[in-house]
Image (spheres, helix red, strand yellow):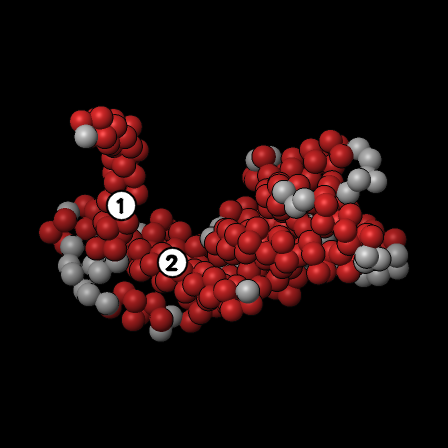
Amino acid sequence: MKNSIGLERAAWAFVLPALLLIFVFFFIPIVAALIMSLTDFDIYALANLKNLRFVGLRNYIELLQTPLFWQALGNTAYFVVIGVPLSMAASLLSANLIHAKLSYFKGFYRTAFFAPVVTSLVAVAVIWRYLFHMRYGYLNYVLTSLGLDSIDWLGNPKFAMPAIIIFSVWKNFGYNMIIVLAGLQSIPEDIYEAAKIDGAGVWSTFRYMTLPMLAPTLLMVSIMTMAGYFQLFAEPYVMTQGGPVQSTVSVLYLMYEEGFKWWNLGTASAVAFVLFFIMFSITLIQIRLSKVEQ
């Protein structure tokens, strides 16, 4: 009995520092932001807290009545709906390429695919801005070489978000590739040998064996990717500054402008919690759909 009590105290002693850090740097800021979203906290309240007033749900109501918020939400949804499947497809394809027995230079591919993840986003964004340049960009050089017209990738509202999606998929798919590759390597080889003996082709094996066994991994990857893509900020901030004509303004970019450009911290906090609610709801839907399919 005494030994079990001593072990329990030792366990709490090891866990307590981490719990304190989580409480101080995670729980308290969340509660403070939630309280702030119910106030009119702005630059005047920063100067003197006596100017702070409790407004209840007014920030949320006004936010839902703001056209720019719905445009930002639409831009973010467009980015997520297109970018997440593309990122997962690129991750799955590259992981299978590295995992295949007949592929050569696996170390080179693994490094090349993962290198963008650990590269500074600002640095590669500057390079991609040159690639997307209307007159001197390499992409337009290829298009004109094929007899096609140049595209103003970052200056045309129709192409600005697709350009950011292309850049984001290239930048982030390597992280998911490592997770999918680990899932592929955990599948027993005996299953593939049995399928080969039964006469299953490459596509049948992938469709009816690999994908079902990767389903838990792909679910986790989809949730992580969706959560990351809903927090779109750095790419439009560096490449387009939300333009042209606000076609690349995301919800997180709107929160940044409200909080640090206009100093409407109460409204910015409300934006953050609306985004959290949307992400949480979609995650629950994904989990329930995966259980129904199983």
**Residue at image point 66% right, 49% down:** 91
Image coordinates of residue 82 in percent, x first then y, are 61, 62
User: Quick check: 48 left or right of 134?
Assistant: left
Image coordinates of residue 99 in percent, x first then y, are 73, 41
Taking the view exactly as shown, the residue that stands out farthest to the bottom is 65
Mark 2 Cα shell of 10 Å, populated few (<14), some (14-19), many (≥20): some
Structural distance between the alpha carbons of marks 2 and 1 = 15 Å
Taking the view exactly as shown, the residue that stands out farthest to the front is 1
**Residue at image point 78% right, 47% down:** 193
- Asked if 46 appears above or below 244 in the picture, the reply is above
* Residue that label 2 marks: 276
* Quadrant including the C terminus: bottom right
Three-letter amino acid code at disc 2? Phe
- Asked if 138 appears above or below 123 in the picture, the reply is below
Q: Secondary structure at mark 1?
A: helix
Three-letter amino acid code at disc 1? Phe
Q: Nearer the viewer, residue 192 or 53?
A: 192
**Residue at image point 62% right, 52% down:** 214
Q: Secondary structure at mark 2?
A: helix
